[in-house]
Amino acid sequence: MASRQELQALAVAKERLVREGELYRLSTLRSKHEVIHALQPQALLHGAVDQAIGTLQSRLGAFIGQGGGLSGISFKTVLPYAVTVGSWIARKRLWKPAAAAGVLAAVGAWWLMRRKPEA
């Protein structure tokens, strides 16, 4: 026969195991809801946009940040305006003139960067 202290220790251990099981169940349920939320289309789009912005900032940051006039601009603040302008260009069917203007701007920037004396 087990003594009173042993029975009490077993009861405490059982209560602790029950509490740990409840905590595990709640954490599993919370994780399930986080996964369900993360797989919604809006969350996926938001993550993709954040990833694209981070990639642009890391790739173009070296060019923009070296004393350029665009070093203080955040892509997250410019993106809504760019989307608005892009949709307007698509509605008016101005893709070819916009592409030509972009190519001319890129060539002009390349020419100015090439002309710039090395410091």
Image: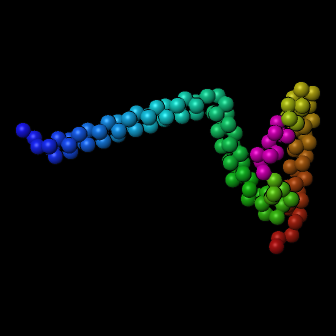
Q: Is residue 76 magenta?
A: yes
Where is 45 relative to 119, above or below?
above
Position of residue 36 measured from the top left corner of the image (x, y, whole percent):
55, 29
Residue in the picture at 80% in, 46% down: 77
Q: Does residue 62 appear in the picture of this structure?
A: yes
Which quadrant: the C terminus?
A: bottom right
Residue in the picture at 46% in, 31% down: 29
Q: Quadrant of residue 3?
A: top left
Position of residue 110 measured from the top left corner of the image (x, y, whole percent):
85, 55
Asked whether 3 or 20 is in front, the reply is 3
Q: Relative to residue 58, is residue 117 drawn left or right? A: right
Position of residue 22 measured from the top left corner of the image (x, y, whole percent):
38, 35
Where is 64 relative to 96, above or below?
below
Residue in the picture at 84% in, 60% down: 68
Q: Is residue 48 magenta?
A: no
Q: Relative to residue 2, is residue 107 drawn left or right? A: right
Position of residue 14 measured from the top left corner of the image (x, y, whole percent):
26, 38
Asked whether 112 or 68 is in front, the reply is 68
Q: Relative to residue 98, is residue 33 drawn left or right? A: left
Residue in the picture at 87% in, 66% down: 116
Residue range highlighted in magenta: 74-83
Which quadrant: the N terminus?
A: top left
Considering every residue shown, the one lying at the far left of the view is: 1
Asked whether 63 or 118 is in front, the reply is 63
Asked whether 80 or 114 is in front, the reply is 80
Characterize the magenta stretch by its predominant secondary structure: helix
Where is 53 relative to 83, above or below?
below
Q: Quadrant of residue 112?
A: bottom right
